[in-house]
Image (cartoon, helix red, strand yellow):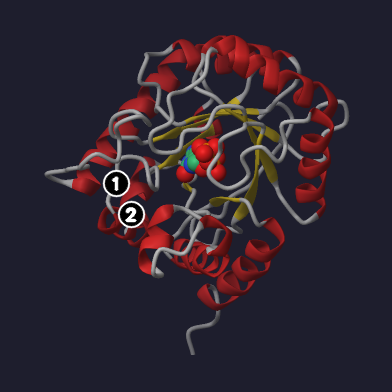
């Protein structure tokens, strides 16, 4: 993607760590901490120094109930950060947006990837923008919209429905001209999913291997971890995040999207070594 190369051994992937920076007042973990552009850039560079392989910069919270923001507001939060960060990026930079004009502005500044939590729900325009810039694209499954997605999520066939939706998004992206080896798929942990749905998806990432794309997962500090641990708040979900990432690696994840890069990186390196050990 745009000069940045990642190589995956399909059977023994070295998991890439995607570090999260939210330039928002209301994100569920780091809301309000990085609204100042200089602070956001400092944090992004610190995550890269901790071992992030990719940074994911977002300016719109997609937590359950979130009303969303206007493109003008999203651009006003995002672009000052990207201008500074992309003037010497420490690693490839992804932008967490579903709006084609926000993505276009970010890619014009040199961002490498777009992370679309709607899996191209509004059609191919976002993919077209990625194709025009030679950028990579992640398509993530969500049932509904952030405002309503956690109101009784329901599936007849969870794995089949999520896979089919991602398959459609991949086809749309490829038809729009995004390079086939620059597309990632994500089952969307916490996006229109019950606790049981999230656990099944993390356990059965093998189902998504047939799509032939790197698999990204984002369990970091999400509410299913709180639900499993007497409702601990996001600030107390590090150990649960480590467990989820380790299990995702064992199940074949290629990229984990996390707030705690240093801790997750250490846990993941050990998990990979055990996964890939000589069987006996
Ligand atoms: N999760 C969040 C946001 N973007 N993108 C992908 N591909 N996968 C995810 O699981 C994912 C995502 C939500 O987490 P966060 O960015 O920390 O919170 P908020 O949406 O409140 O900013």
Using the rendered image of the protein, determine whether residue 149 is visible from the camera's viewpoint: yes
Task: Answer left or right for 139 relative to 168.
Answer: right
Name the residue tied to disc 2: 198
Give residue 10's position: percent from left, percent from top.
Answer: 50, 54
- Residue 12 % position (x, y): 54, 62
Crowd rating for badge 2 (residues with CA inside 10 Å; few <14, some 14–19, many 20+):
many
Residue 128 to residue 36: above or below: above
Q: Are marks 2 and 1 in contact (CB under 8 Å)?
A: yes
Query: Which residue bears the numbered disc 1?
Result: 193
Cα separation between marks 2 and 1:
6 Å
| Picture layout, residue 257 above or below residue 243 | above
Earlier sequence position, callout 2 versus callout 1:
1
Count the marks: how many? Answer: 2
Residue 132 appears in the picture as rendered: no
Q: Residue at x 32, y 60 (%)?
A: 199
**At which x and y percent is residue 129?**
56, 12
The residue that appears at 37% across and 67% down in the rendered structure is 228
Which residue is most to the bottom? 280
- Residue depicted at 55% across the width and 52% down the height: 256
29 up-or-down from 132: above or below: below
Helix, strand or loop for disc 2: helix
């Amino acid at each position: 993607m745009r000069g940045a190369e990642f190589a995956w051994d399909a059977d023994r992937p070295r998991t890439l760590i995607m570090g999260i920076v939210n330039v928002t007042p209301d994100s569920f973990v780091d809301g309000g901490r990085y609204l100042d552009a200089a602070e956001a850039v400092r944090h992004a560079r610190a995550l890269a120094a901790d071992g992030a392989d990719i940074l994911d910069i977002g300016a719109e919270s997609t937590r359950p109930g979130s009303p969303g923001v206007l493109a003008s507001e999203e651009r006003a939060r995002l672009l000052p950060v990207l201008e500074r960060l992309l003037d010497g990026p420490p690693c490839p930079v992804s932008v967490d947006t579903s709006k084609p004009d926000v993505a276009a502005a970010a890619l014009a500044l040199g961002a490498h990837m777009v992370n679309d939590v709607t899996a191209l729900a509004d059609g191919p325009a976002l993919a077209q923008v990625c194709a025009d810039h030679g950028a990579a694209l992640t398509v993530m499954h969500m049932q509904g919209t952030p405002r309503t997605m956690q109101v009784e999520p329901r599936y007849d066939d969870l794995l089949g429905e999520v896979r089919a939706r991602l398959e459609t998004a991949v086809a749309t992206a490829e038809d729009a001209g995004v390079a086939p080896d620059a597309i990632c798929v994500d089952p969307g942990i916490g996006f229109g999913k019950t606790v049981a749905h999230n656990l099944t998806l993390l356990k059965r990432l093998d189902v998504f291997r047939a799509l032939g794309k790197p698999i990204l997962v984002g369990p970091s500090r999400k509410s299913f971890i709180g639900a499993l641990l007497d409702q601990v708040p996001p600030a107390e979900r590090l150990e649960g995040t480590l467990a989820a990432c380790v299990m995702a690696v064992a199940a074949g994840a290629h990229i984990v999207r996390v707030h705690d890069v240093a801790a997750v990186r250490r846990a993941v390196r050990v998990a990979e070594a055990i996964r890939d050990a000589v069987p006996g």
